[in-house]
Amino acid sequence: MNLAQFPRRRYTEGQTPLEFLPRLTKELNGPNIWIKRDDMLGLAGGGNKTRKLEFLVADAFAQGADTLITCGAVQSNHCRLTLAAACKEGLPCHFIIEERVPGSYNEQASGNNFLFHLMGIASVTVVPGGSNMMEAMEKLADSIRQKGGKPYIIPGGGSNAVGTLGYVACAEEIIAQAFDKGLNIDYVVCTSGSGGTHAGLAVGFWGNNTNIPVVGINISRPNETQRPVIIKDAVATAKRFGLDFPEAMVDCVEGYVGPGYSLPTPEMVEAVKLMARTEAILLDPVYTGKSFAGLLGLIRQGRFKKGENVVFVHTGGSPALYHYKDYFAQS
Ligand SMILES: *Cc1c(COP(=O)(O)O)cnc(C)c1O
């Protein structure tokens, strides 16, 4: 797939590691577990949004923008990384923050919220849960235009046919690394949230004719509403290469959200502890802890067999871990 046709900024030096996890694999007595360390991507704190922002910020420049606007939840990794990209590029950055739990935005909070202020966010507008985020961002963009600015709006999670190119690129990076290591991948497992990661990997592994299935673990929605989100993004992204992406390729797994987005589950706590104690790799409670819990569940159900090679894509999020330390209080 010709990714070089699209403008791109670079925020990571080289590739992120594709590592085998021997102690975890032994402990699970199932498939061989590999991990793609996208928690080690560039920009402050790393994580998957960095790959999307390489294409989004390049698009912003192509359109003559001089200001970035984005949105997210109170502890948004995506907001932290958009601001980090803006800092590196010398652009002001504005957030619309959705208070999904009433009263949960606290300017003094730690984790990502602390980093918003450390990196010098230009403005934070807090809106109630369920607000129309695009409308709120458009309104802010209008007021910036009135003052002579040229704002560029990045949707929640950076998941559109521009940002998702970052995960098409990640699929190609994994394919090249696996070839180099003589690793024959049977499955790729990732987190399925706003969708760009899942959709981009699905398009990338399919568009390169690898026959490697991509399994996305839902962290906020049931399949009924998550699959259409992934299909829409994957179809739009594939279209940029002149390709018709088949919807049947989208595989979402539900059952690991628990009581809701960002709320803890016992399976998540177990998964975060297991990864920390066997491989000293930090997951996060909102995304990768739940998706890794999903991978553990699929192993127990026999979906992946002993000897098969499963690559878990670590999408980052560890800066938020410290904010949620009470979830692990009894450990
Ligand atoms: C945003 C995020 C995800 C979800 O990725 P999407 O592309 O939005 O589906 C997963 N893990 C972490 C740590 C994130 O910040």
Image: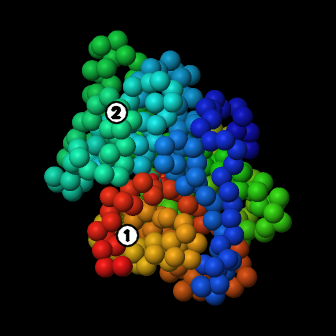
How crowded pointer 1 is (Cα within 10 Å; few <14, some 14-19, many 20+) is rated as many
Q: Is residue 50 left or right of residue 126?
A: right
Under tag 1, what secondary structure? loop
Q: Quadrant of the N terminus?
A: top right
Residue drawn 68% across and 57% down? 17
Q: Quadrant of residue 221?
A: bottom left
**In x, y percent, where is residue 230?**
50, 55
Q: Quadrant of the C terminus?
A: bottom left
> Real-space Cα distance between discs 1 and 2?
30 Å
Label disc, if present, on residue 39 of the rendered structure: none
Label disc, if present, on residue 121 of the rendered structure: 2
Q: Quadrant of residue 181?
A: bottom right
Seen from the viewer's position, the closer of residues 124 and 189 is: 124
Type of amino acid under label 1: Val
Seen from the viewer's position, the closer of residues 91 and 176 is: 91
Label disc, if present, on residue 257 of the rendered structure: 1
Residue drawn 38% across and 56% down? 320
Seen from the viewer's position, the closer of residues 116 and 209 is: 116
Residue drawn 44% across and 20% down? 66
Residue drawn 39% across and 35% down? 119
Q: Is residue 324 left or right of residue 312?
A: left
Q: Is residue 105 left or right of residue 254?
A: left
Q: Nearer the viewer, mark 1 or mark 2?
A: 2
Residue 197 appears in the figure: no
Q: Which comes before the other along the chain, label 1 or label 2?
A: 2
Q: Is residue 27 above or below residue 20?
A: below
Counting the numbered discs, the total is: 2
Q: Is residue 103 above or below residue 155?
A: below
Tag 1–tag 2 contact (CB < 8 Å): no
